[in-house]
Image (cartoon, grey):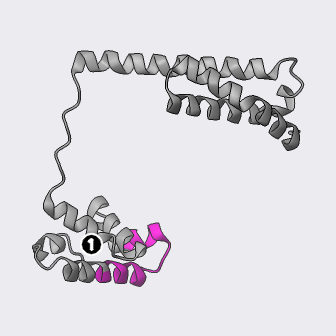
Amino acid sequence: MRDAQSFDEFYRCTARRTMRYAYAVAGDHTEAQDLVQEAFTRAWRQWGRLSEHPAPEAWLRLVVARLATDRWRRLHRWRSVLSRTGSPPDAPPPSEDGVLLVRALRQLPPTHRQALALHYLFDMSVEEIARETGVPVGTGKSWLSRGRSRLAALLPDLAVEKLEANDVS
């Protein structure tokens, strides 16, 4: 059984030292924070046994060191792959229409956005949308219809044909 009070005391007594150690090992403050957080998460999961360990702080440092090594290895493999394949191409900037569409979508209720996304991005029918969202078919159809109408009102300059090209009646 885990004792939250003793774990909290352990955390208070060791967190700063562990953070300094992780920073020395990782060489990056953000990376050190991630390492320490993961190490304390693992310590909490095993706190019933770890609290009886003769040196729980040493165990914690060992976890930090192993996590740092694992991350370094992953980074090294990633760099190796990049050296063979080259960096991925830069992503192009979003189109003006895309920016306008995202801005308009943010003004819709979440249910309408969800229905539109499921329909246009996943090619789902009204029946499939209703099943996925757990609503009656009529509600799903209403969300889709209202979402389209509101988008058309918010985006009068965009070709409405683009929005209606995949329309299901």
Tell me, yes or no, whether the highlighted magenta stretch contains residue 141: yes
Image quadrant assignment for residue 169: bottom left
Does 44 appear above or below 87? below
Left or right, 146 with respect to 30, comes to left
Image quadrant assignment for residue 120: bottom left
Please report the bounds of the magenta region as a residue range.
127-146
Q: Nearer the viewer, residue 17 or 61?
A: 17
Tell me, yes or no, whether the highlighted magenta stretch contains residue 21: no
Residue 40 in the image: state x and y as whole percent: 70, 33
Residue 106 in the image: state x and y as whole percent: 34, 70
| Residue that badge 1 annotates | 104
Left or right, 66 with respect to 130, comes to right
Residue 73 in the image: state x and y as whole percent: 47, 16
Does 92 appear above or below 100? above
Q: Nearer the viewer, residue 44 or 164?
A: 44
- Quarter of the picture containing the N terminus is top right
Does 1 appear above or below 162? above
Instruction: Tell me the residue at 88%/17% (across/down).
Output: 54
Q: Nearer the viewer, residue 55 or 104?
A: 55
Instruction: Tell me the residue at 86%/28% (across/down).
Output: 51
Does 9 appear above or below 102? above
